[in-house]
Amino acid sequence: MRFIPINLDNVKNAATMFVGIANKEPWNGEWTYSSAYARLFTIAKSIGFMGLITMDNNGLPCGFVMGNTVNRADGGLDFLICEICYQNNEAGLVYAKKTLDYLEEQLEMRHIVRALYVGEGGNPVSDYFAKLNFSNVSNVVMVEKRLG
């Protein structure tokens, strides 16, 4: 297994994986290649961006994680995971865990305090992240206001 940094040239590979995975359980998205590419390309252009495509032992892409750093009031940095994409099965969890372990090493070298994920999906997605050793954060507020 190896990790390839995501850049503006290979984000299309991540978009293809994203459509194939994000439209299945437990996410049940309605992504097209065009909408997925637009989202991931925008993330890849953001300040503080970092992303990794995971290559399996056969050299095939099997998932990715991407996000960016943001400053904290105390001067520290957080890493916001904007997208993480792996099959929702045992093999996918193994690849996701190994990728997140590697990402954690990279973030710690940059003195980043914590990694956060905020996204839609409810309990199935929360359960998925619990399997990846993430925990709910009681002091994070997520609210919405629908427009129009």
Image: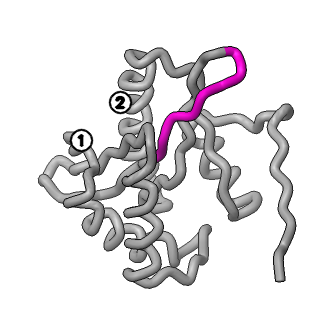
* Disc number placed over residue 107 in the picture, else none: none
Depth check: give the residue in front, 77 or 95. Answer: 77
Decide if residue 91 is in sight here.
Answer: no
List x then y, in percent, for residue 103. Answer: 39, 32
Residue pointed to by mark 2: 102
List x then y, in percent, for residue 80. Answer: 56, 41
Residue pointed to by mark 1: 3
User: What amino acid is found at the position of numbered circle 2 in the picture?
Assistant: Tyr
Depth check: give the residue in front, 11 or 86. Answer: 11
Asked whether the beta carbons under mark 2 and mark 1 sit within 8 Å of each other, the answer is: yes
List x then y, in percent, for residue 132. Answer: 55, 40
Depth check: give the residue in front, 6 or 25. Answer: 6
Residue at far left of view: 58
Circle 2 sits in a helix, a strand or a loop, which is it?
A: helix
User: What amino acid is found at the position of numbered circle 1 in the picture?
Assistant: Phe
Q: Residue at x 52, y 76 (%)?
A: 24
Q: Residue at x 53, y 45 (%)?
A: 81
Q: Residues within 10 Å of mark 1 (few under 14, many from 20)?
A: some
Q: Residue at x 38, y 63 (%)?
A: 41
Decide if residue 13 is in sight here.
Answer: yes
Which region is colored magenta?
67-74
Q: Is residue 29 left or right of residue 107?
A: right
First in residue order: circle 2 vs circle 1? 1
